[in-house]
């Protein structure tokens, strides 16, 4: 609603396409863009970039992980669509990549744009002709109606219940504090801080869980970004072909226009995998030699899941160790392929190597034979367990697919952290209810309930106060 | 028959807490003002509780005072016990409450009115408003008032402060009397006149407990409630030393199961439960019947016995208002420890009265459909002396501004509880008498009772109710606060022996590197006061300055956050909606939003956004429409010039 903050959205629509555009507009746009973008030599440069000049480079997230190779352009106001400082990032059009870039821009302080908000700003800043006012209002109206319907539709069942329950409990705490402030002679707050501290920890854990399931929801909707790694000739492409062939459920097949990336979408009994690969993977076995470890590292950094394929008919060597170590901080499944041939490598040996690289991790090792099509079911089960806690049922899981929900949950979480800090800093009780109220309002955005006089209603219904 | 025909600038109808502030404000701004009351003996009457202030209400009194109102000064003269509530909580919710000597309070206020230049007191019932059609503004314009005896007062503005007197009726069980509070004459004629002008009225109710003969109460069975040792005055103009005096006690006792049994057994004789009362009552001030029914699980309720004054034996029974019949009342009161042999001086009763839905008013408290007509107080659907005084003051100020041809003064949510009160009244759909509560003020960290002068004195000065001397004092205080904060932020202490010993002795962690004094004040176990030992350059400053210094440093982070929110809020408030907007032309608005906007006619986008039923998307649509509207105007302008 405010006009002077910075908003961001995917400007090209949430479907897979050749190219996707993330648009950031507002006073902080250039600054946020500067955080996101690195030029070919790895430097931030947008802040000083000439207006309307295309720059080639990469988008990195907060941890410095490269999200995509992109073109970025700064358009300083008033010479932009909205009339404000704007940054547009052209990336590869995968839904997952676009969402990740958008997510990162929100982390740097942008707010997710309301439907029609860029157009609204363009109009308010005099960039759209007066005669279009009617059309602009319709865009806002219909966009919001659509958003509301889809939001409500996603709210069936558990999430809605969980959010309502959280809200009710938070409101109850606010009402208690406020009632005591309004009627100190009837209601005492002695010992309340300790109680609220425990309560806040409980609330935090529950909001955290919902937030985690927000990622879970993303995986369901958009697929798990997967990279298959391994030495040449271990059966990577056969595995891919097998997975493709088994379901024949290729959703899209987009070859990028600027480089040879190929994404295959595979649905494995409800688990959607986006297998990121090089174009050459089907033609040549010599991937490591061909594109080098650096290239492989780039893909690995972007992935949610790494499938490491080893040929168990030949001994493990330093290359195995090197490639597998790319999987640091990632979900990994190791396939001991060619189990139909002579077993040179035992599972123990493999586990020992893994232990050498990741001493604290348990990484599943599965025996497969792509040729004889064995072990694939086990692979599916392991992935399901890894990403969905084994309980993948489509409709009953608390799943948040909407980024807006995630944004609200995150703000709620942040506010609850502030409550906790206020208690730790021994602030007076009236300070707790300020941040509790923020948390309450954020959750209200998810279920679209008005917050108006809730606190006053709650006070009167629960506390007998007054003269 | 010849009739009296007088002239005035402003007529104020009613001399309760709203009427007094309204009339004083107008007269002090130099306007010839007449204040009407059905009885001059009931000027500034306190017909219910014998105290002023309390949580969030104390803030209102302070704000009224900062703007040049009278309530704070009057209670400082007439209090008999005083207490700062919530002192163990944050500074934002500290709130003053004082027990008043009711007769004294009324008498002192009457004296102030009687000695005010340009102000005339008139005992008469106003029965009719005079008005004409204002063709320029396409609405009505008030031109005067007419009393029951036929006297006409021609004037430029009228302020309605009728409180609970309009078509009032009092209920005590089966017996109904058609009087105002405390047996005073009701005003039965004005309603018709208001309705003819197109003003919609509705009915609210409230109630008051019995008054006891103090000699019949056994205080030994009750807990004594003392006032504060050091009394803080309400008014910024009162010398703190002048309010240090002997105080009286209040007493605490409790209802019990026996009390509740009697009430339950006689509910059918309660006018509310028997359906005789039609008005809507306030939930925060429930009758004892309501408490027993709605909170059936509670074994007891608190009862506060409070003196009505120094020169009377009457005691107010706080917490037990009722409309049960006389015999039930006596039986029920006598179950309470200490009241076993009580004698009732005045019965408890409920009172019903006509009032308005305040959405018919602009935030200036002027009627949207009648220019020159203002209203304040309980008539606007509020409750409480303090709420009334605050509105009376604002209505008075803006009536004066309209007569003087000056710009109106608006009070917004980010600068005062008064702003919150008025915005809530004119923007929300209130279904019961509105009471101020601290939870209603979203920026309450900024709206403290201790800084009401810093927030509002300047405005009072601009209005003309604060003198040059008072204003200069304020500027001096601001300066001292600013300088001291700067000094504390720039004065560093090193991690030397003396400092470390001091910190350890206060249970505070020793320093690793140098720290500013301000940083130390932020530690929960330290304060401005306690740092005097290690603050060699400190000069002695007035207490009201060091208090602000301490608060602003200690709560800086929180205050900064609220200030940022206020910035956003102000932007929306500044986007004004033209009076002649035609919402039917904004086709993209949802039906519900359009209806609500037409009904409330908000003055700004900010106000529109707080109307229930208006969504953020509607606000976006409205913003686009306004831009379109404004740009069209500019285009028309320039084409006219061509």
Image (tube, rainbow, N blue to C red):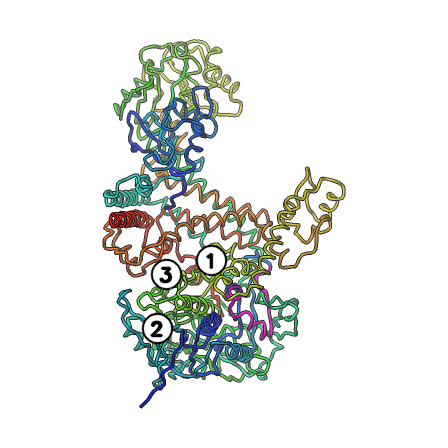
Q: Secondary structure at mark 3?
A: loop
Label 2 and label 1: CA atoms lie apart by 27 Å
Which portion, as a residue range, is magenta? B63-87
The percent coordinates of residue A45 (x first, y second) are: 45, 26
Label 1 and label 3: CA atoms lie apart by 14 Å
Q: Which mark, by number, is residue B203?
A: 2
Residue pointed to by mark 3: B428
**Split into 4 quadrants, where in the image is the N terminus of chain B?**
bottom left
Above-or-below relation of A224 to A196: above
Q: Taking B91 as reference, is B385 left or right?
A: left
Above-or-below relation of B309 to A18: below
Query: Which one is closest to the eye, mark 2 or mark 1?
Result: 1
Q: Secondary structure at mark 2?
A: strand
Residues beneath discs 3 and 2 located on the same chain? yes
From where the camera sits, is residue A153 visible? yes
Q: Quadrant of residue B83?
A: bottom right
Residue B387 within the magenta-colored segment of the rendering: no
Residue pointed to by mark 1: B441
């Amino acid at each position: 609603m405010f006009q002077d903050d910075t908003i961001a959205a995917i400007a090209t629509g949430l479907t897979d396409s050749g190219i996707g555009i993330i648009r950031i507009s507002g006073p902080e746009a250039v600054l946020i863009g500067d955080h996101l973008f690195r030029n070919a030599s790895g430097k931030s440069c947008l802040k000083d970039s000439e207006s309307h000049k295309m720059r080639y480079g990469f988008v990195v997230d907060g941890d410095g992980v490269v999200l995509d190779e992109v073109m970025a352009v700064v358009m300083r106001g008033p010479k932009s669509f909205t009339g404000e400082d704007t940054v547009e990032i052209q990336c590869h059009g995968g839904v997952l990549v676009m969402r990740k870039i958008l997510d990162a821009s929100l982390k740097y302080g942008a707010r997710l744009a309301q439907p029609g908000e860029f157009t609204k700003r363009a109009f308010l800043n005099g960039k759209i002709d007066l005669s279009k006012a009617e059309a602009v209002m319709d865009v806002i109206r219909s966009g919001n109606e659509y958003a509301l319907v889809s939001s409500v539709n996603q709210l069936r069942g558990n999430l809605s219940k969980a959010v309502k329950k959280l809200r009710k409990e938070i409101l109850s705490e606010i009402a208690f504090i406020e009632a005591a402030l309004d009627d100190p002679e009837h209601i005492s707050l002695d010992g309340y801080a300790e109680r609220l501290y425990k309560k806040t920890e409980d609330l935090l854990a529950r909001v955290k869980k919902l937030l985690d399931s927000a990622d879970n929801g993303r995986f369901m909707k958009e697929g798990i970004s997967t990279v298959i790694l391994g030495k040449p000739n271990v059966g990577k492409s056969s595995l891919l072909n097998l997975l493709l062939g088994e379901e024949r459920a290729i959703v899209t097949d987009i070859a990028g226009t600027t480089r040879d990336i190929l994404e295959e979408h595979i649905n494995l009994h409800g688990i959607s995998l986006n297998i990121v690969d090089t174009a050459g993977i089907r033609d040549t076995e010599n991937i490591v030699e061909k594109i080098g470890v650096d290239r492989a590292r780039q893909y690995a950094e972007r992935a949610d899941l790494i499938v490491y394929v080893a040929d168990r008919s030949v001994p493990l060597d330093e290359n195995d160790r090197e490639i597998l170590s790319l999987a640091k901080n990632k979900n990994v499944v190791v396939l001991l392929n060619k189990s139909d041939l002579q077993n040179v490598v035992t599972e123990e040996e493999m586990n020992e190597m893994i232990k050498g690289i990741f001493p604290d991790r348990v990484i599943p090792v599965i025996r497969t034979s792509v040729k004889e099509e064995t072990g694939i079911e086990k692979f599916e089960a392991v992935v399901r367990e890894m990403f969905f806690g084994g309980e993948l049922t489509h409709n009953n899981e608390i799943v948040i697919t909407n980024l807006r929900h995630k944004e609200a949950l995150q703000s709620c979480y942040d506010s609850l952290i502030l409550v906790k800090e206020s208690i730790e800093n021994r602030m007076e009780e009236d300070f707790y209810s300020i941040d509790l109220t923020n948390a309450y309002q954020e959750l209200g955005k998810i279920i679209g309930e008005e917050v108006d006089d809730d606190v006053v209603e709650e006070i009167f219904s629960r506390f007998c106060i007054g003269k | 028959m010849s009739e009296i025909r007088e002239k005035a600038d402003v007529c104020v109808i009613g001399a309760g807490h709203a009427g007094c502030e309204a009339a004083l404000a107008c007269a002090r701004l130099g306007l010839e003002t007449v204040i009407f009351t059905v009885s001059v003996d009931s000027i500034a009457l306190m017909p219910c509780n014998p105290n002023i202030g309390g949580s969030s209400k104390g803030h209102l009194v302070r704000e009224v005072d900062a703007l040049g109102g009278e309530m704070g000064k009057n209670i400082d003269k007439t209090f008999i016990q005083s207490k700062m509530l919530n002192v163990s909580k944050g500074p934002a919710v500290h709130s003053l409450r004082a027990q008043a000597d009711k007769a004294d309070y009324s008498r002192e206020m009457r004296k102030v009115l009687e000695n005010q230049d340009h102000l005339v007191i008139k005992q008469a019932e106003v029965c009719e408003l005079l008005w004409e059609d204002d063709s320029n503004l396409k609405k009505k314009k008030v031109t005067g008032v007419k009393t029951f005896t036929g006297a006409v007062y021609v004037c430029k503005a009228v302020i309605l402060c009728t409180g609970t007197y309009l078509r009032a009726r009092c209920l005590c069980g089966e017996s109904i009397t058609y009087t105002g509070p405390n047996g005073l004459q009701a005003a039965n004629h004005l309603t018709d006149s208001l309705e003819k002008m197109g003003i919609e009225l509705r009915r609210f109710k409230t109630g008051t407990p019995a008054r006891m003969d103090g000699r019949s109460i056994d205080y030994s069975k009750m807990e004594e409630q003392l006032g504060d040792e050091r009394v803080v005055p309400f008014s910024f103009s009162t010398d703190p030393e002048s309010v240090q005096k002997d105080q009286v006690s209040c007493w605490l006792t409790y209802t019990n199961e026996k009390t509740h049994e009697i009430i339950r057994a006689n509910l059918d004789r309660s006018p509310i439960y028997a359906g005789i009362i039609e008005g809507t009552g306030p939930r925060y001030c429930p009758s004892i019947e309501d408490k027993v029914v709605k909170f059936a699980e509670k074994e007891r309720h608190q009862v506060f016995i409070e003196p009505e004054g120094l020169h009377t034996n009457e005691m107010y029974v706080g917490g037990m208002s009722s409309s049960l019949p006389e015999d039930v009342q006596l039986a029920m009161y006598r179950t309470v420890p200490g009241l076993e042999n009580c004698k009732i001086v005045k019965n408890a009763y409920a009172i019903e009265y006509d009032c308005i839905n305040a959405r018919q008013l602009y935030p200036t408290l002027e009627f949207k459909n009648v220019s020159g007509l203002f209203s304040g107080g309980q008539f606007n659907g509020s409750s409480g002396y303090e709420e009334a005084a605050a509105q009376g003051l604002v209505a008075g100020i803006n009536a004066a501004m309209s007569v003087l041809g000056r710009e109106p003064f608006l009070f917004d949510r980010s600068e005062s509880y008064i702003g919150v009160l008025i915005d809530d009244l004119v923007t929300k759909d209130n279904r019961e008498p509105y009471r101020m509560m601290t939870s209603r003020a979203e920026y309450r960290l900024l709206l403290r009772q201790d800084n009401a002068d810093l927030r509002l004195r300047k405005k009072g000065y601009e209005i003309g109710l604060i003198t040059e001397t008072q204003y200069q004092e304020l500027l001096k205080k601001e300066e001292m606060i600013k300088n001291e904060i700067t000094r504390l932020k720039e004065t560093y202490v090193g991690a030397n022996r003396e400092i470390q010993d001091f910190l350890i002795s206060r249970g505070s962690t020793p320093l690793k590197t140098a720290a500013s004094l301000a940083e130390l004040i932020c530690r929960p176990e330290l304060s401005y006061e306690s740092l005097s030992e290690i603050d060699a350059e400190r000069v002695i400053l007035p207490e009201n300055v060091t208090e602000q210094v301490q608060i602003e440093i200690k709560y800086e982070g929180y205050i900064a956050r609220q200030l940022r929110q206020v910035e956003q809020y102000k932007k929306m408030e500044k986007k004004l909606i033209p009076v002649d907007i035609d919402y039917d032309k904004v086709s993209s608005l949802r039906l519900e939003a359009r209806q609500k906007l037409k009904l409330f006619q908000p003055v700004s986008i900010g106000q529109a956004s707080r109307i229930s039923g208006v969504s953020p998307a509607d606000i976006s649509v409205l913003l686009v429409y306004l831009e379109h509207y404004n740009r069209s105007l500019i285009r028309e302008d320039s084409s006219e010039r061509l």
